[in-house]
């Protein structure tokens, strides 16, 4: 009997195999493994957790409820939770900027001689380069952004390379970095929702997404789990 | 305060009660809408639409069904309706990434979830809808068929294709250049 088709195997996650299918499964390791994979996949899908909505979602919903008359009048001095309204993207951009400036500061501080056997990290100024201060045209500004992105990526690559020997120490250092990258991606995405053509925010989004995806690829190659 | 008390207060236009109901269920609503939508920008609009419908209909809610069950169904319908509108205009043009709460999860779970979410995004619309409703949300094929306007048989057929497609996307592949296993996503 030929192998069961992928759809047939997917059906057997829920249904009892026919005698012929059962006979084949008993003799074919490939199809048996595929069925086991799909059972794990289905169980994992059923266990996916809820996803928090964007922080500003309630503020927007509340405004809409008032517009539609479902909520009567603004409550005086009401407490908001989350980043609200038109300032949302600015706050999100500020989060991203703070992270990157913080990263740059950390990078600079690490410029002191490191542990034995390691190269000394170069000192990096946290001030923007002089050329970034006053571009004379939009084209110049876009060019500066591209240069800055390249420098940032190069610096980040070097940082990751030098951090490598120490990355395995501590409790799940990958988890904190992954969470931070997820947070940056989410913040930048929220900012892009408000300012979709902003080159700086686009740069942050692209860089953080690329780093996050690279991390997923790297981790997945190290992972012993056979089915995903 | 339990659901019944919050609902009673929200019915009379109590903003704090509405906000508390929202806080209690917003992640569940957003999750199902986000997974059906396949992208954040649409998910935010469609989940807002779901909540508007719920609060608008709340005075008529008599509690025949559990509030969470009713809310979930409204969310699914809002997402499906939103998707139909989008499909009338254009195919999906953007692929955005999912938001994951990653910090506190064990390593394998974090990456498995990330990859599952991304694999779901890559499915064609109808397959994604059936997979999310059946395998993630636990609806029966009869319920899925009713929601999507198709037969239970069609729901099954789409589900089996979706599962097979998911496995294809998720399975590790051999990277010949390095000898290491790489992944599709």
Image: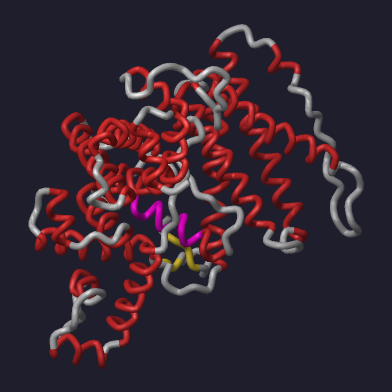
Quadrant of the rendered image containing residue B14: top left
Query: In the picture provided, is A97 more to the left or to the right than A56?
Result: right
Q: Which residue is found at the position 19% from the left and 82% from the top? A: A16
Vertical comparison of A110 with B19: above or below: below
Q: Position of residue A218 (x, y in %)?
A: 56, 59
Query: In the picture provided, is A92 more to the left or to the right than A128?
Result: left
Q: Position of residue A176 (x, y in %)?
A: 66, 52
Q: In front here: A47 or A95?
A: A47
Q: Which residue is found at the position 31% from the left and 48% from the top? A: B67
Vertical comparison of A12 with A127: above or below: below
Q: In front here: A130 or A52?
A: A52
Magenta span covers which residues?
B111-121
State the quadrant of the N terminus of chain A: bottom left
**How is this picture coloured?**
secondary structure
Q: Which residue is found at the position 26% from the left and 92% from the top? A: A26
Q: In front here: B52 or A202?
A: B52
Q: Position of residue A177 (x, y in %)?
A: 65, 50
Principal SS element in the magenta part? helix
The mark tally for this picture is: 0
Q: Can I make out residue B28 in this image?
A: yes
Q: Can I make out residue B42 in this image?
A: no
Query: In the picture provided, is B143 more to the left or to the right than A213?
Result: left
Residue B53 painted magenta: no
Residue B119 painted magenta: yes
Vertical comparison of A138 with A110: above or below: above
Q: Which residue is found at the position 30% from the left and 52% from the top? A: B66
Q: Position of residue A187 (x, y in %)?
A: 55, 34
State the quadrant of the C terminus of chain A: bottom left
Q: In front here: B47 or B117?
A: B47
């Amino acid at each position: 009997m030929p192998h069961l088709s992928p759809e047939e195997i997917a059906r057997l996650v829920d249904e009892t195999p026919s005698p012929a299918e059962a006979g084949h499964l008993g003799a074919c390791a490939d199809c048996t493994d595929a069925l086991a994979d799909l059972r794990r996949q289905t169980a994992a899908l059923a266990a996916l957790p809820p996803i928090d909505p964007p922080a500003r979602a309630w503020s927007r919903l509340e405004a809409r409820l008032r517009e539609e008359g479902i909520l009567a009048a603004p409550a005086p001095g009401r407490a908001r939770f989350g980043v609200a309204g038109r300032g949302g993207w600015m706050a999100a951009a500020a989060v991203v900027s703070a992270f990157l400036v913080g990263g740059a500061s950390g990078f600079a501080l690490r410029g002191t001689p490191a542990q034995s056997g390691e190269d000394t990290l170069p000192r990096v100024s946290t001030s923007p380069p002089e050329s970034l201060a006053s571009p004379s045209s939009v084209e110049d500004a876009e060019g500066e952004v591209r240069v800055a992105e390249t420098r940032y990526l190069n610096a980040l690559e070097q940082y990751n390379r030098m951090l490598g020997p120490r990355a395995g120490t501590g409790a799940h250092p990958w988890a904190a970095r992954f969470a931070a990258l997820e947070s940056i991606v989410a913040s930048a995405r929220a900012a892009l929702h408000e300012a979709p053509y902003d080159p700086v925010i686009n740069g942050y989004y692209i860089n953080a997404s690329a780093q996050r995806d690279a991390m997923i690829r790297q981790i997945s190659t190290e992972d012993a789990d056979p089915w995903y | 305060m339990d659901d019944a008390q919050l609902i009673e207060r929200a019915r009379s236009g109590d903003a704090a009660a509405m906000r508390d109901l929202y806080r209690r269920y917003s992640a569940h609503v957003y999750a199902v809408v986000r997974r059906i939508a396949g992208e954040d920008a649409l998910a935010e609009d469609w989940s807002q639409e779901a909540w508007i419908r719920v609060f608008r209909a709340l005075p008529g809610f008599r509690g025949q069904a559990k509030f969470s069950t009713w809310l979930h169904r409204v969310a699914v319908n809002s997402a499906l309706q939103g998707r139909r509108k989008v499909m009338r205009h254009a195919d999906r043009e953007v692929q955005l990434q999912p938001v994951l709460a990653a910090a506190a999860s064990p390593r394998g779970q974090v990456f498995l979830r990330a990859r599952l979410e991304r694999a779901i995004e890559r499915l064609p619309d109808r397959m994604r809808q059936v997979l999310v409703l059946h395998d993630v949300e636990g609806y029966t094929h009869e319920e899925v068929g009713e929601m999507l306007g198709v037969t239970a048989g069609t729901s099954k057929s789409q589900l089996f294709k979706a599962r097979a497609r998911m496995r294809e996307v998720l399975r590790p592949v051999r990277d010949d250049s390095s000898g290491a296993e790489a992944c599709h996503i």
